[in-house]
Image (cartoon, coloured by chain):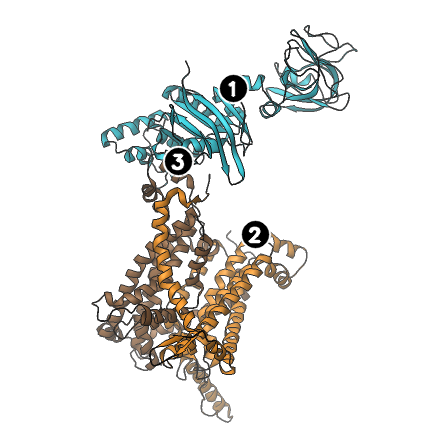
Chain colours: A brown, B orange, C cyan
Amino acid sequence: MSKKSAPGPLEYLRRWQMQAWLGAVFLFLYAPLIALMAFSFNDSKRNIVWKGFTLKYYDKLFNDSALLEAFGNSLTIAAVSTVISLALGAAAALVLWRFRFPGKTALDGALALPIVVPEICMGVAMLVFFARVMPWPQGLPWPLNLGAIIIAHVSFSFPFVAVVVRARMASFNREMEEAARDLGAGEFRTIKDVILPHMAPSLVAGALLAFTLSLDDFVITFFTAGPDTVTFPVKVYSMVRFSVTPEVNAASTVLIVLTVLLTAAALKLQGDPAATAGHGAGDAK
Amino acid sequence: MLTMEQSWKQAKAVFAASLGPPLVWLALFFLAPMAIVWAYSFGHNAGLTEIAISGTFSNYARAIEPLYLKIFLKSAWVAGLTTGLCLVLGFPVALAITFASDKAKTWLLLLIMLPFWTNLLIRTYALIAVLRTEGYVNQGLEWLWKGGGGLAALVGLQPLGDFQPLELLHNNFAVILGLVYVHLPFMVLPLYSALDRLDKSLLEASLDLGAGHMRTLFKVVVPLALPGIASGILITFIPALGAYLTPDLLGGPDSQMIANVIERQFKRANDWPFGAAMSFVLMYLTFIAIAIQAVLAKKTPEAKA
Amino acid sequence: MTKPIITFENVTKRFGKMVAVDNVSLTINEGEFFSLLGPSGCGKTTLLRMLAGFETPTEGRILIDGQDISNVPPNKRPVNMVFQSYAVFPHMTVADNVAYGLVVDKVAKAERDRRVEEALDLVQLGGLGHRKPDQLSGGQRQRVALARALVKRPRVLLLDEPLSALDAKLREQMRTELCTLQEKVGITFIMVTHDQDEALALASRCAVMSRGVLQQVASPNDLYEFPNSRFVADFIGSVNLFEGVLAVDEPSHAVIRSPDLPVDIFLDHGVTGPRGGTVWAAIRPEKIELHKKEGDVPPNLGDCPHGTNAIAGVIKHEAYLGGSSTYEVEIKGGRRIKVQRSNLTRWDQEDFKLGETVWLCWHACSPAVLLS
């Protein structure tokens, strides 16, 4: 296929109108982000005209102890909530995939709620809960003082993990499990030897998903955080509200790069993004 | 090769171990808080920090007063407009990706999803830099204006007056632009998913019978991809309806949406019962939207490849 | 010397209202290659799974070596299964797969390695222990499943549709191999299949099931030549069934009169059946001879009275199968009779043509009489 033939009737992508539209959309989506990242290196406080390349705002960023503390908090919260979300999500996926029990439909629905409910509603619920019902003890040492936020994050991310794991379990051949039992393995051993290995890719994908969701969250954290438990997005928010300085650009760039790297890793592990994005778990057995 | 589910009685230990933790967590840290908020929506403030749950409907009544009703309707309108724009912008994109070569597909999907994975806060902030009076758009326009003025002077015409920067920020325009910017990837994925599942030979048949592309699009593609379109509309509309950050950072004083009002009740106005009621009205709207989509999804005939 | 090893006693299995296995009582002897045969949905797989322990009987008991194992979990039974999809663990090497059951039993490493090697050699996969399942063909994966089950030295090996996923050539090869394997290992094999050729070729005894009910348990030869019901006669191979009345029933001979057949069917033995009652005569296609029709006198095979067991007809359909040819011959009254003829010489196919009028005749010992 060396010669360029005229586009076929359904080869929409090869028509210049489509290409133009696609180009325009991508420009729209990326230009602001690229500009933002570019200007984090701009040697000018006012962020308008390019004055010269500098890393001084990154320097400022890495010396801003408040910001670093917030970042540290965010990472800790993300890490802890990811671990808990993985355990809960995998367990939920296992029970829904494997068993028939009264109230199963109800559980299915209940698990979908955190995914579907608007973030602000959940944020409000968390605020009320930790203010009135189960106040998180004040003055706990780090990282325990982040407990409320961690709990909130787990609550909205473990259902996502459950969805990812469940999709993967749909392609599991039950006979494998029966074979293990036939060969002498007990129930828990079977799970460890046969089911968990099959789940593994989805656990990694789920972990990365939970981590990213936690790291990026603003609304729910905004309602659960206190003055001494500030996370990165919340800190950046207060910075953005008051000024548009290149330091914020630098902070944003760092976060963008981090998120992109994590997500790229997740995708690599889950297989072809075209397959998973379009059709759900189309993994080989 | 059986993939039947077991009855829970056949492996009680495993069942208990895998059901217990998620169920307890869900009940304690999600359902319980939600239930409390729901209870509060029927209460009123009694004293500075106490809330008495009196079973009153006054909060809900207040939520549909003209002042707040206006905000609900406005939010719905903004969310609807956003969804519509995303649909118009995103549909050709989804179409193009569906018919791209496999290699191109992977990259295109990745490129569409990448902005989605970056932090919402950052994306919104990036737009501020673009839209403000000293932002890139206005700078660009100013540059053009000055250039135009220079040309006019050359030709001997009256010079143009001072450049008046466009007010692009802190108004409804910015909010809608921001919401479209944030939610566009949300729309493309389900659209692509539905289109990709279509039997391509149906389109070819339509073209073979003499229909043009537009007619094929509206008479064949859209009806069959309707569940995916409905899905995309839902995934875009609901978050847009409950958006907080975008109207907060990009909106002006009259660009308040539901989420902003709710936040105010809890943070500044200290009227938790009212905030709770508003919160639940938003939830009911969400569920209604989901129900509508579910009903529509059941009605469409399948046309899978 | 047959010693029973497995006994099903009045076993019934219900799934809600659906009866999958209906009051089945069956004894399988040690060292047999036994087959459960029947169309899909007949309950054979459910019966096998109850034996393996993946389903529990709703009623009745299952005994292994005289012990009631109905409540013993699958991982504690002296029974191992080769699954229909083979269920080879994809994340373990071949050797690890085969060793799995031994690891669970906490067998010492040295002995484990020895037994694994032995098992792999047994199924002709020696030297492939380090490979991963995705590097193996379907047939090879099946052998891994076999080795994995046999290395545990079970009393009984269960096979769920072992040959269904293989292509024709491989299937034939595996058939012989399974036979040899069973003889070598010497344990009882119980196989489930819907393919009667497979069952007849491999098993020493078969149980034919239909809709959860046991129809007949017999050797392949007995099932084929002495079926006990129309279902079995029709399920196994091809058959011509004639519904009729038992007109004559003497100790030395019997006559069946059928409305479908202008002539009587003469049998050279008595039938202890309902005098004057409804019976069926089952005649296999290969037992019917084709003769050229020249004149009006049918050929006489010598063992039946004139005017019975012979009829004229027109060949309406023929199919050439290489080693044999099958014909459909239409007789007076419209009924079509299936005939099979071996092509003994290279020109036999040309003997009979479509549209030709022929004589059909059979021996008096050929029909089987069915009472149900």
| Residue C218, numbered circle | 1
Give the spatial CA distance, label 2 vs label 1: 48 Å
Vertical side of C282 occupied by C142: above or below: below
Rendered residue at 32%/29% (across/down): C152
Give residue C79's quadrant in the image.
Answer: top left
Q: Residues within 10 Å of mark 2 (few under 14, many from 20)?
A: few
Residue under numbered circle 2: B304
> For the residues tagged 3 and 2, is the chain the same?
no
Q: Amino acid at mark 2?
A: Lys
Give the spatial CA distance, label 3 vs label 2: 33 Å
Mark 3 or mark 1, which has the lower sequence index? 3
**Secondary structure at numbered mark 1:** strand
Task: Single out the mark in the foreground, 3 or 1.
Answer: 1
Given residues B125 and B228, the one toward you in this image is B228
Give the spatial CA distance, label 3 vs label 1: 38 Å
Q: Position of residue B243 (x, y in %)?
A: 44, 73
Give residue C359's quadrant in the image.
Answer: top right
Q: Amino acid at mark 1?
A: Ala
Q: Amino acid at mark 3?
A: Leu
Task: Single out the mark in the foreground, 2 or 1.
Answer: 1
Rendered residue at 34%/64% (across/down): A153
Q: Residues within 10 Å of mark 3 (few under 14, many from 20)?
A: some
Q: Residues within 10 Å of mark 1 (few under 14, many from 20)?
A: some
| Residue C136, numbered circle | 3
